[in-house]
Image (spheres, rainbow, N blue to C red):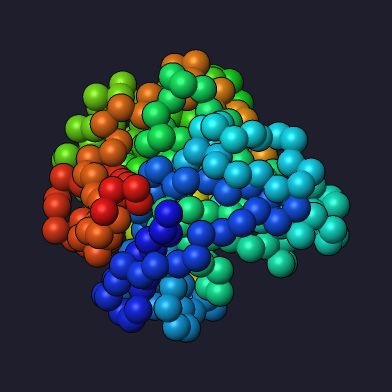
Amino acid sequence: MGNAAAVMTGLNSIEIQERPVPEPAPGQAVIRVEAVGVCGSDVAYYRYGRIGPFVVDGPFVLGHEVSGQVVAVGEGVENVRVGDRVAVEPGTPDRTCDQCRAGRYHLCPDLEFLATPPYDGALLQYLAMDARCYFPIPDSMSYEDGALIEPLSVGLWGCRRANLRPGDDVLVTGAGPVGLLAAEAARALGAGSVTLTDISDYRLGVARDHGFGVEKSDAPSSRTFDVLLECSGANGVLASGLGRLHEAGRAAVIGLAKTDEVPLPLSMLNWKEITISMVNRYNNTWPLGIALVSSGRINLEGLVTHSFPLSQTAAALENTSTEPESLKAMIYPQRL
């Protein structure tokens, strides 16, 4: 039994290499990786070799949207057993620092996050992790659904950071995978209405098929909202979205801006007492995400638009550039 891995050997370069099959240490479990979604961060590392302070230095394995099946468990593991189908939370905190002890494990300064340098990701056939990062999924959920719990978690955490309340009218800027999943999360958590904006007619069409209101970004209506979930990271979108909030409106900044300097209309924010919350990954969202998907309250249909075997990882990473009607590319490591 081998452990083929898609290894980034340089900018825009992927090679299939053999890695040792891991053995589980105490507290760990090994999964056979079945599905890995391609995230924008994977594409950024592949194209540019860095995101902010995180720099790829040497051979590197991408991928952090993961699901698989447990094939081995280490000593002391009780939450999963061999044969379980699991969705993977990709960050392992130290569980002892001040942030972890305060319940903010996602802000752990020593968090080991898959596919964030220097930690390799999950684009390989077998992966060992702290078993507490594995969450069983029911048979009604596919491995693709399991991998999508990671970007869904971003949306769920964004809703929580925005203090979304039942009945809120929600504006989601950016109808990519995270924006669509944030919209699904908002509706499942009781939003009165959800409207998405984007420049892409295709993505707005998917949003419309999911039952959401839609607007072209360059032709907004005069409607105002209670909550903004900014998922695009595009220049100027945050400021314009904030301008569409009611008094005492709340915003969560989910999309990563392309620059550290983002102009904001501070006077207006002051007059209206707008609250802005930043979003850094997620905290304790996997059980909720799995429950919402498995119960049918969140619709993942149509989000996975392209599928690739492990040997075509480079094509999967280039998919959003080569296919205008692309949302989420999924890689299957067991297929070579």
Residue closest to the far front: 1
Residue closest to the far bottom: 57
Left or right of 181? Residue 138 is right
On screen, residue 40 above or below 52: above
Closest to the observer: 191 or 288? 288
Is residue 259 visible in the rendered structure shown here? no
Left or right of 3? Residue 250 is right
On screen, residue 144 above or below 115: above
The C terminus is located in which quarter? bottom left
On screen, residue 115 above or below 169: below
Q: Position of residue 321 (x, y in %)?
A: 19, 60
Closest to the observer: 190 or 12? 12
The N terminus is located in which quarter? bottom left
Question: Residue drawn 46% across and 56% down?
Answer: 122
Q: Position of residue 295 (x, y in %)?
A: 50, 16
Q: Position of residue 10 (x, y in %)?
A: 33, 81
Residue closest to the far top: 295
Q: Position of residue 167 (x, y in %)?
A: 54, 20
Closest to the observer: 311 or 148? 311
Question: Residue drawn 26% across and 31% down?
Answer: 302
Is residue 4 visible in the rendered structure shown here? yes
Question: Residue drawn 16% across and 45% down?
Answer: 325
Question: Residue drawn 56% across and 68% down?
Answer: 119
Asked which quadrant contains residue 304, the reply is top left
> What is the count of numbered marks?
0
